[in-house]
Structures are given as structure tokens and as C-alpha cells.
Amino acid sequence: MSRTILRGRVLTFLSEPQGIDDIASYRYLEDGAITIAEGKIVAVGDYDAAALGDAEVIDHRPNLILPGFIDMHLHYVQSQMIASYAGSLLEWLNTYTFHEEQKFSQQGHASAVATDFYKELIRHGTTTAVAYCSSHPASVDAYFAEAERRNMLMIGGKVMMDRNAPEALCDTAQSGYDDTKALIERWHGQGRALYAISPRFAITSTPAQMEAARALVAQYPECYVQTHLSENDAEISLSMELYPDAPDYTGIYEDYGILGPKTLLGHCLHLNHRETGVLAETGSVAVFCPTSNLFLGSGLFDRARLAKMGVRIGIATDIGGGTSFGMLRTMDEGYKVLQLRGDRLTPLNAFYMLTLGNARSLSLEGSIGAIAPGNAADLVVLDVRATPAMRLRAATLTSLVEELFLLQTLGDDRAIAEVYVAGARAKSTLGGL
Ligand code: GUN
Ligand code: ZN
């Protein structure tokens, strides 16, 4: 069995940091060695030249090696419409998004965009993501086929949407059900692929389609569910008009039985007390999408209130409402959103969220999100001196926490020195893929 050893400064989280000096929440090795065999981590410890055996050693010093970043919500079919100029969510959807997504009925287009989408993920250090495809099954095939080719753990699904969008993008309650079922059978558990049942949001799904979603969730409890919740005031009002019997927006999804520990709810910006309690009780995950929320002027995520009430939280780019594929840029803006809320996010918490935190929110602890034996060797190598401005600032660093804060505040794709997917170099080899 051939083994590879990555040498570098190794950082991985063990638990959610409880403060800026919570040294028990992470493991840090100043001169660490990660031993990899057959795509998995088999050992982690201090580097020991005497214990190398026949292993190949790749020396990443002085860079930091962390678990690969996890992006909990984005739309791969919106890769070519980032930076579309709109005042707010519904205008943005109607003017650009629904037009753009129609192109994905063509398998060739879907495959071409999927290839570039994965390149962007890798370039930015993301090794697992949860994406919406378009309503066309061909877009899902392209998405998972490309993930398989790259050996990546990816989650996604076809959006179900049967109203309030152009005809060419709409399915029906029946076809949305049938297509989703066929795609789950084809892709869920195939290699590293995992399926997310994806009713887009209440506005674009009729009650009949929500019933179909309920049936799918009951039939396939092992699958994820993803949808959007409480992003924008006009969206909330229209949702309540369309579902007048629901107590509130969250109540729509609650009534159709699609909340639960595998349910990922994008945005969650304007939830009332009852809704927040329902998310906590059901174990559903609220996904914070800072660059999107700022770009579309949707609102400021209230992490402290949600966390206090026991809601599970993840963080994501939400491409193409979001404006960067990078989780470092996402965290920079996330930090600023929380500053405006009077909520301090420590750098330890930031990197916890990007790795183990998001893995836990996906119930994938033990597979990804930590550098530990048995986990996949999905890793990112970070260079805090990647740009002139970073190098200038790095000269005054005095601690690991300061280094992390610099990475999240000034870092972008240039700070991602290398990426490993299932033990294989993925960023430096992108030219060949
Ligand atoms: N709500 C429903 N669809 C979408 C989408 O594509 N992007 C965002 N940001 N919100 C949505
Ligand atoms: Zn979204």
C-alpha cells in the first residue's frame, strides 16, 4: 500500500470553540505529518524523519494544512450570472436567474459549466459543496458525473419548481417527483455522491408539489433536503399569500413534513420566535450566506439569536446571489455582517465553521471536516503570505489566531496554495482537468 505524508503546520478542530483562547477546541501541530493511503487519512502526528519508511513526503512548510472547506449552499447553474445587477431577490430571480437556468436543458452546456464550476471550487479550497442544479435532470447528471471524475464528496439535486417561473423551467408535481426519484436511484450513494431533494422555495412550488416533496422525504430519509427560507420581505409576503393557512413561512415547510436534521434552509434572515423554535426542535440547519445577503440587500443573519435558541448553523457562498466562490471571502463578509449585529465571531469559530462545523451541520462528522484517521484526505493548504498586502501584514503576526484572522480577512484564491481531494493533489493539477 503506497503512502504519502504531508508535512506542514497542521490545524484541525475537535469541538466548537467557546472563545478566542479556547485551545482545547483544536489540535495544532507546528511540524506535523498527515499520512495518507488510498484516499484516506491513516495517521496524524508530529513529523518524525525516522518513521517515514517508503512513504513519499510532500513538504508544505511553512504553510498551514486544514481540512478542505465545505460550502453548504450554492447554485452551480448560476456560475455565469454572478454580478447580475438587481435591486432585490425577486427582481434578480425573474430578470436573470430563471433566464440563465433555462440553458441547462442542454447536456453539453451543463457539462461545460460543471467543469468550470468544479475548477472554481478547487481553486478556492472547497472540497465538498451542496448545490442546486436546474430543474432539468441533465443538469444533475452533469453535476454528479463531474464530481465522480474528480472523486469529490458532493451533495445536490434537481430543483423542483412548478409555478411562478417561465414555462421552460417548470416541471409539474408529478414530473418533479418522478425525475427526483429517478435521480436519487441513479446518484445517491454512487461513489461519494449524496442527493438533496430540492423544492426551490414555497413561491415556485404548488401545494401539490409540496405534497410530492413530502412523499420523497418520507421515502428517502437518507437524502438531504434543501430549500430557501425567509430571505427577503417581498418573498415572505408572497409566500404567505400563496399558503394562507400556514402560520408563517417556516410553517409551510413544517406542514409538509420536510423539516428535519438533514434539511438545509438557505438564508433564515427574518424568522420570528416561533419559527426559530421550530428549526431548533426539528434539528433543521439554517445556512448563513453573507455575500449573497449583502449583494441582494436581503438582511443581516442573526447568528447569536439562532444559536441561543439551539438552531444548527452552516455557512455558504450562495453563488450566484453570492459574489465569491471562496469560503475565505465569505467568512470575511460574514464577520462584518455579524459585527453589524453586535456579534463577535472569533477566527477560531470562523475556521471551525468552514470545516468541522459545516461537516457537523451535514451530519458528516467522521468522514470529512477534520484531519483524523479514517476521514477522507480532503485538505487545503493555506499560505498567509500569498499577496503583497498579506506578506506585509504577516510580518507582524504574533499568534496562530492572528494568522487565521489575516487569512479570512485578506485571503482569497491566491492564499490556497494546494488542495487535496481524496489524497490526490487537485489544485496544482487543474491544468490537466
Ligand atoms: N430563492 C429561490 N431561489 C433562489 C436562488 O436561486 N437564489 C437565492 N439567493 N434565493 C432564492
Ligand atoms: Zn440559494
Image: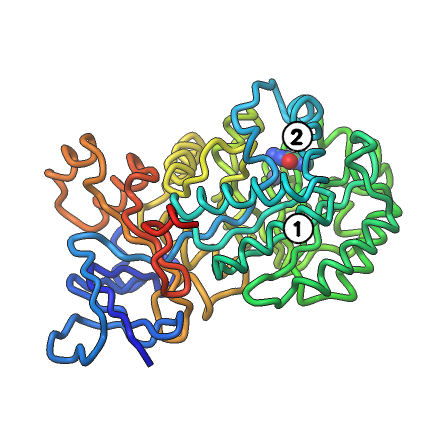
Q: Amino acid at mark 1?
A: Val
Pointer 2 residue: 100
Q: Is residue 223 left or right of residue 171?
A: left
Q: Of the numbered discs in the image, which one, if any, rests on residue 318? A: none
Res. 15 image quadrant = bottom left
Coordinates of residue 159 in the picture (x, y in percent): 71, 45
Secondary structure beneath disc 1? Answer: helix
The residue at 51%/50% (across/down) is 314
Residue 140 is labelled as 1
Label 2 vs 1, first from the N-terminus: 2
Label 2 packing within 10 angstroms: few (<14), some (14-19), many (20+): some
How far across and how far down the image is residue 155, in percent?
58, 56
Secondary structure beneath dot 2 equals helix
State which quarter of the image contains the N terminus: bottom left
Q: Is residue 361 above or below residue 80?
A: below
Q: Residues within 10 Å of mark 1 (few under 14, many from 20)?
A: many
Q: Position of residue 400 (x, y in %)?
A: 20, 51
